[in-house]
Image (cartoon, rainbow, N blue to C red):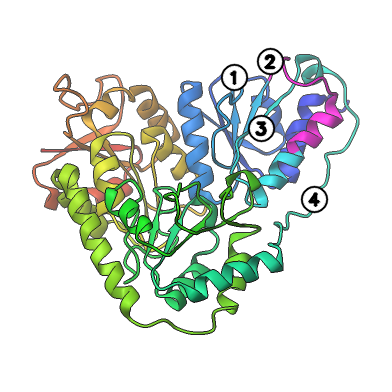
Amino acid sequence: MDALRTGATAVAETLAAHGVDTAFGAPGHPLHRPLVDAGVAVVALPDDDAARRAAAAYARVGGRPGVLLSARPDRLGGTGTLLVLTARGDGPARGADDTAAAVADALTAMRRGRLRTVSVDVAPDVLDGAWDGRPPAAADASPPVADPDAVARAADLLRAAEKPLVVVGAGAVGAGGELTELVQALGAPVVTTTSGKGVVDDGHPLSAGASVRLPAVAGAAADSDVVLVVGSGFACPDGVPVIGIDVDADRLPPGGVGLLGDAAATVAALRAALPRWASGIGVVRAAALRAECREQARADGRAFELVNDVLREALPAHGVLVGGATPVSRLGSVHFFPVPAPRLFCDGGLPAAVGASMVRPARPVVALLGTGALACASAELAAAVELGLALPVVVVRDGSDDGRTDGRTPHDVRALEVRADEPDDLPDLLLDAWEADRPTVIRLG
């Protein structure tokens, strides 16, 4: 006898039909088994928050929608390609086919580049009710194309600019090549948000890195005669002409030239309207801004510069560094760990490192945490052990624990643990950790 097909089957088969092969969730979610039956692996994390951070990192590093099986919807409307599936019965009233269609619509919007977390509730009666339909086919995911007249207005502003500045965010991760050509044509310094880090190679002569938090960038924006913002909600100073490019109309600048469209295609259209190469003055401006940003970053992050320098040398160019909300990452890696491409740095702590490690094809991943972050992540570390992840977890005393812990792993977590007396000990220890059959906690100092 054929197995009963239900509304849960409808959701699971829709995810599989749209190319989803991995989801994240705390144990016990009613969609767990139907997803596994449909060929979607479910990575179990200890709680909703850990699963959320793992799914978000999986999406950011893998460049595909992250799927979260959650006990609660996303009430904050978070940014990112994250589909949150709940089973509470407090969402819109809809049957199995409409629920599957809502899932399909969310995934299509994400493939079009819309950075908006979407929650879909699967009502309990839908979960268990009989269903004999078919999952909705994948729709055309072509992103919107910017209006040519708006592109022409933006090109006029850029052509006349003597001191342009480019600000890049997560919405531009697919436009790295086009943006590199454009900033070279403009001779414009480029800065990124943390989530846009690497869209233009951090080592490019026109790059000032992921520095938008620093006063130097606000000063550079105020001193510019036009600011081009691509895939970011960066707030430009009053009185400065601004051009915004985004697939989300809500993120376009209200008082500037807004280009609603795919970042790569729109930037390419702008580049085509600027057939000249700029003088070398842009490189000089970028070098000055980069130096000013570096000195400002050192004001509160100097103590973390060396460990990030060593990790940069040790981690292959395609490897991923995962940090957290602690100083060694927030004040250190953001500024002192350059990446040549997007999706090679993310935050979210140890759960995010688990999510990044699940991306296929696999790449080397390192988690960089403060002792306080490790002290709060024993359950996530145990989950990484159960998954058999060859994940190095470098732990630095960065003040995040207020001296309350020595950074040791709990005795009941079967991770490996080693000590690095100096940052220069890290490269050999990382090589060993990537060959291990479980995570390795590398305690520095």
In the rendered image, which quarter is residue 153 located in? bottom right
**Mark 3 highlights which residue?**
36
Badge 1 amino acid: Arg
Q: How many marks?
A: 4
Residue 192 lies, in percent from the top left, at: 40, 55
Mark 3 or mark 1, which has the lower sequence index? 3
Magenta residues span: 87-103
Mark 2 or mark 1, which has the lower sequence index? 1
Badge 4 amino acid: Ala
Tell me which residue sits at (38%, 65%) in the image: 201
**Mark 2 highlights which residue?**
88
Q: Foreground: 310 or 327?
A: 327
In the rendered image, which quarter is residue 202 located in? bottom left
Viewer can see residue 428? no
Tell me which residue sits at (81%, 36%) in the image: 101
Instruction: Say which mark, if any, is on residue 139.
Output: 4
Element type where label 1 sits in the image = loop
State left or right for residue 384 relative to residue 433.
right
**Mark 1 highlights which residue?**
72
Q: Foreground: 14 or 342?
A: 342
